[in-house]
Amino acid sequence: MTRPKPEDDEYWNSSKFSAFTFDDEDDEFTKMKESKRAVNSMLVDDDDDDDDVEKVSWSGEPIGSISWSVKETASSIRSSGEQSFPKIDITPSLPKQGSGYSLSSLFKGKQQVICCSGLAKASDKIKCNQNNINAFAEILFRELMLREIALRHYVHYLKEMGEQKLLVELMKALGRTDDMALMQYKEHLNIKDEGQRRDFLKNCLSLPFSQDDAIHVQDHYTLLERQIIIEANDKRGDAEIFKKFPRKASILNMPIITTLYYSCFYHYGESDGTFSSPANIRKTFRISEKQYILTALGARAKLKSWFDVDSLFNTKNWLGYTKKRSPIGFHRVVDILQKNNAPVQVLQEYMNLIDDPELKLSLAQKYKCHDIVIDTYRDLKDRQQLIVYRGKVERGSKEDKKIEELLCNMQIRWKN
């Protein structure tokens, strides 16, 4: 094959049209992979994590950096200007035999460039001349393979025009088999019926995805299949909790974290063998302990189920003693509990578990946990700060009396 002339590359590199790129970071599977990685390996530094469990809703909105879902996939495709695919090290192979058709008029005219209108005409010929489709497509694809920038424009054009089948054929001709699989997988967005979408996703499992993509498609299918089962049982609303807290919407097509939150809210305590069990969902979708604790804490705190909150953190050592342990940091636990209007006694119990005295003091002042503030200043032997804080509590209250007793205690060796 002959290489494209310099004029061709100059035109495409300077074109005002937005070119498609295979390296675009905003494609649906890149987002799904990044989200999935976030679910499986949450950052150790708790300060980097937002309290995303409070953003869970039945509307299917993406939940911070820890969600991946059908809805997220759909919204990213609708809002993204371009579609991209992973790079694949496969040398394209197309028949080289002669043909009675030529694209020279498209590629070697007076301007010696191919324009978008030319690409459109080429696509129309492929669609219209069904006696000629194979030969014409071969020539078009072969010529495009010599012009990378033009190829990107053409892929962008096909996407904008909704030419899904032709785009799949192009990916196949270029040797991009897993890209072709992704293009076919994308068709699930056009299927409204959940049963038909589930069956479509099941058929997609046999497509030649990359190893990582195959795992995500399997998870997608498994999640929707499970949501259909849960929805069929829950929409009747027979259980008491559905009468006390009616569902706001269907669970179908919700993100995995929203599904877990829903399960922790309506199905907490169910045996591991049921599809709606939080433990079953956690195991099936490989959700980290950190993410599970965050999600379950938000759900149980919303229901004011403080016993369940305690059970999330209670652990026993080898001597049988119970102590509390948290993979997310007790300062975050306090924040979530406060947002759900936990009683002061509950807040203070978890605030006392914060190791950093300055952080503990800051949160205690913020949430008006007076006993924690008073005890911290006592432990720091800071008489001056205790006197200052006395002016912030109600005169004659039990907190005021407690401060007075401490200030009069001659056994305390104050540092100021």
Image (tube, helix red, strand yellow):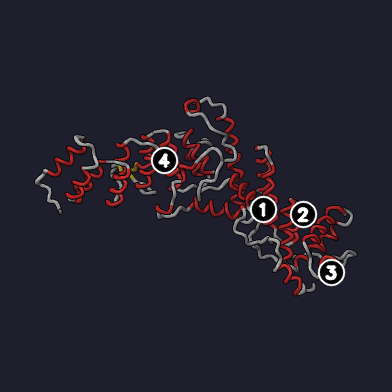
Q: Position of residue 266 (x, y in %)?
A: 48, 33
Q: Residue at x 70, y 50 (%)?
A: 184
* Amino acid type, label 1: Leu
Q: Quadrant of residue 345?
A: top left
User: Is there CB contact under 8 Å for labels 2 and 1?
Assistant: no
Q: Residue at x 45, y 35 (%)?
A: 268
Compute the Cα span from label 3 to label 1: 35 Å
User: Is there CB contact under 8 Å for labels 4 and 2?
Assistant: no
Q: Position of residue 196 (x, y in %)?
A: 68, 39
Q: Position of residue 128 (x, y in %)?
A: 86, 53
As drawn, the label of residue 297 is 4
* Amino acid type, label 3: Gly
Determine whether the residue tagged by mark 2 lies in a helix, strand or loop: helix
- Labels 1 and 4: the sequence-earlier one: 1
Extreme residue toward the left, this view:
410
Q: Is residue 191 left or right of residue 104?
A: left
Whether residue 316 is visible, yes or no, is no
- For label 2, the residue is 166
* Amino acid type, label 4: Leu
- Labels 3 and 1: the sequence-earlier one: 3
As drawn, the label of residue 109 is 3
User: Is there CB contact under 8 Å for labels 4 and 3?
Assistant: no
Neighbourhood count class around disc 1 (C-alpha, 10 Å): few under 14, some 14–19, many 20 upward: many
- For label 1, the residue is 182
* Amino acid type, label 2: Leu
- Labels 4 and 3: the sequence-earlier one: 3
